Amino acid sequence: MLKIAVPNKGSLSESTIEMLREAGYRTRREPKELIVTDPDNEVEFFYLRPRDIAVYVGSGTVDAGITGRDLLLDAGVEAIELMTLGFGRSTFRYAAKPGLVASVADIEGKRVATSYPGLVRKDLADRGISADVVRLDGAVETAITLGVADVIADVVETGTTLRNQGLEVFGDPILHSEAVLIKGNRPGPEQAVDVLERRLMGVRTARTYVMLDYDCPRHLVDRATELTPGLESPTVSPLQDEEWVAVRAMVPRYGRNRVMDQLYDLGARAILVTDIAACRL
């Protein structure tokens, strides 16, 4: 039975559970459930702290897991990122009081507070910068005000929390993070993990694209399919009227109206938009 670690709480938990549910898996019904067995899919889900998931996957205790890329890299374990999942996006950056530092090079010799010491130490080492990294489990934004550090490195979303503490970001982002599917870097149930990956990819595709069907004058089909190239290539089928063809292609969900307008202007007709069902192999 495939063992999969998923976040038990935090910003990634709800979105992970919803995605697994859309992929056809059984998920927990109440927050206190820590282990959920799905015999129909031969999967066992373990609800763990997001920060611990990469460690369990890297050690081979579980076969795969869903966590943040930032947590994966911070853990420094032998685990492989298989795919991004399209939620939980964030940016990891340095911040300080205005005027204290102008660039990342100015961190040299200073104290950096963070909840991601492994990630920050690696970034500073890659840049050839020597600094004292102070690990904090939370409330990193107050570290400078309390005199614990000169600089912080933390997840930045809107930047409101930083501004409230009189801080501003500087330098290039350390990392762009989001939820990812990971597996261990050792032999395991590859086929079962592949099924999990295909199912989640099916959900992501269904969330990102819609199916567009339309009739198009045959002599304009090349121009029409340039507007609707699909993921690989559109399907073009003959109609009873030899002057027309039927076209089917996937188009980005949030750009479909613009594409439809362009097709109408081109002379297409009978345009139909259909949601794509997630793949449940």
Image (cartoon, rainbow, N blue to C red):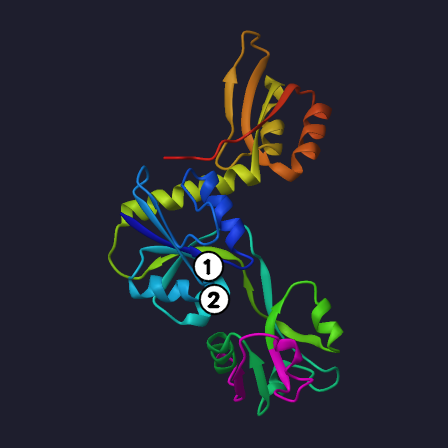
Q: Assess whether residue 133 is covered by the magenta stretch.
A: yes
- Going by the numbered disc 1, the residue's amino acid type is Thr
Q: Position of residue 251 (x, y in %)?
A: 58, 34
Q: Quadrant of residue 177?
A: bottom right
Residue positioned most to the bottom: 109
Which range is magenta? 126-152
Residue at the spot 44% in from the left edge and 65% down from the top edge: 72
Q: Amino acid at mark 2?
A: Leu
Name the residue at the top extreme.
Answer: 240
Q: Secondary structure at mark 2?
A: helix
The residue carrying mark 2 is 71
Q: CA distance from mark 1 to mark 2?
A: 7 Å
Number of numbered discs overlaid on the protein picture: 2
As drawn, the label of residue 67 is: 1
- Give the quadrant of the C terminus: top left
* 272 relative to 44, above or below: above
